[in-house]
Image: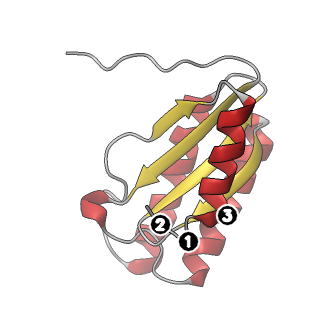
Amino acid sequence: MTRPLRIEFSGALYHVTSHGDRREDIYLDDDDRLNWLEVLGIVCKRFNWVVHAYCLMSNHYHLVMETPDGNLSVGMRHLNGQYPQNFNRLHGVVGHLFQGRFKAVLVQKEAHLLELARYVVRNPIHPS
């Protein structure tokens, strides 16, 4: 069975998450977090993304982001491809860092956006 196509269009707003393989940590220290943020910055510039909120947890991350050019998948391929390469090289390990595909939920209503923003920024304090 094939995967369903992602809904991608110009100006779309998403809640994106990606989890560590086997629920393992994807950041071992602050240098890893900074590296991830650097890669995200490159992706935002290259693919014209707008990040409205983000949260880095030990074994996953959340992004509330907009794609003015409707290019979520190509940008996520770069983010979830480049960061693991950097991580593996820096830590002398091999293999997958992320568990399967990223999850992206289309945000369609302002009320959903408000609740989502609250959830993302409060996640480190009150994880669900």
Q: Give me the residue at 32% from left, 73% from top.
A: 93
Mark 3 nearby-residue class (10 Å; few <14, some 14–19, many ≥20): some
Q: Position of residue 51 (x, y in %)?
A: 75, 47
Asked whether the viewer can see residue 95, the reply is no
Up the image or down, 109 lies above or below 54; here it is: above
- Amino acid type at image mark 3: Leu
Tag on residue 124?
1
Count of number-bearing discs? 3
Question: Quarter-wise, where is residue 110 in the image?
Answer: top right
Mark 1 nearby-residue class (10 Å; few <14, some 14–19, many ≥20): few
**Front residue (pair 52, 97):** 52
Q: In this rendering, would 108 be left or right of 16?
A: right
- Amino acid type at image mark 1: Pro
- Who comes first in sequence, dot 3 or dot 2? 3
| Residue ID for mark 2 | 127
> Quarter of the image containing the C terminus?
bottom left
Q: Give me the residue at 54% from left, 18% from top.
A: 7
Up the image or down, 13 lies above or below 39; here it is: above
Q: In this rendering, would 15 be left or right of 21?
A: right
Secondary structure beneath dot 3 equals: helix
Q: Are marks 1 and 2 in contact (CB under 8 Å)?
A: yes
Up the image or down, 76 lies above or below 60; here it is: above
